[in-house]
Amino acid sequence: MDKTFIPDSQLVLNADGSVYHLKLFPEQIADTLLLVGDPNRVKKISAYFDTIEHEVSNRELITHTGFYKGKRITVLSTGMGTDNIDIVINELDALVNIDLKTRTIKKEHTRLKLIRLGTSGALQPEIPVGDGFVASRFALGLDGLLHFYAKSESVINQRMTAAFVKHMSYSSLLPSPYVVEGSAALLNQLAFDYQKGVTATSPGFYGPQGRVLRLGLADSEMNHKIESFEFEGLKITNFEMESSALYGLSNMLGHDALTICVIIANRVTEKFAGDYQMHMDKLIKNTLDRLVE
């Protein structure tokens, strides 16, 4: 049997031949993709397009592909969390690097540009709420997802990871952290004038990000220790829930990835921006214009 053949239960397709969760065919996506968590944000972005070729939706996964000033771009909502990112990135890669009909890996590799536009909470007091954009030079995964894949150590910054574990006195009960670098090329193209730093990706919104409602925290000093961490001049700038998986899987699969977030809260000053849409609109327009420059 051909060793490159991928069985039905591994590469799951719908009856029409589209990939299982995204419900997409290869011709329905561009090589440049904007990823958003919120399904409602897809229309906000594609409203800027000159034309829209494809509109596909399944659950929280909504895809619009069209043209902006002559450039073909796909906008796709991922939903929240690294588990959703695991689905989205693997299925996007399958669309361009696996022949879905023969279930074999293509000889020629297609490299995607994956740009996440999201919201986030700042972890340093000087980062402004609302009008500040933070681009993730590195993503720090607190989720453990990447460790399920062989050779993940090849894309992990081992020195920064080890320094973080030591600084935190990290509990053995938690998933092992990992740090992965984003695309320097996309950072320079799209975020040259934004604040840059290390983005921590948590596997939840409440306890994993140090929030207390009715349940206490296993480590009440967790956020303070995260805020005080520094490695070769880099600090952890913000908290969110997707970037570590995005960076890790993209690096391993040979794609370029970058996250840029609007800061809607500051966990140190306790400020929150209830109305941040104008700032998100500015980030969207900046990104689209910079992609066509």
Image (cartoon, helix red, strand yellow):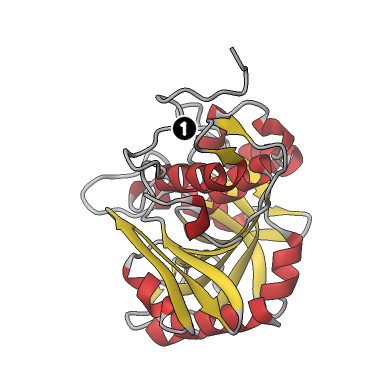
Query: Residue at (67%, 45%) from the top-left corner?
Result: 251
Look at the picture and state if 218 lies above or below 250.
above
Quarter occupied by the C terminus: bottom right
Residue extending farthest to the right is: 232
Question: Residue 198, percent across and down?
Answer: 63, 58
Look at the picture and state if 165 lies above or below 29.
above
- Count of numbered circles in the view: 1
For residue 161, which quarter of the picture? top right
Local SS, label 1: loop
55 with respect to 253 (left or right) = left
Question: Residue 179, percent across and down?
Answer: 65, 45
Look at the picture and state if 251 lies above or below 125.
above
> Of residues 54 and 138, which is closer to you in this image?
54
Query: Residue at (75%, 71%) from the top-left corner?
Result: 188
Query: Residue at (51%, 59%) from the top-left corner?
Result: 29
| Viewer can see residue 24 | yes
| Viewer can see residue 191 | no
Tell me the residue that label 1 is attached to: 174
Query: Residue at (39%, 41%) from the top-left corner?
Result: 17
Q: Amino acid at mark 1?
A: Leu
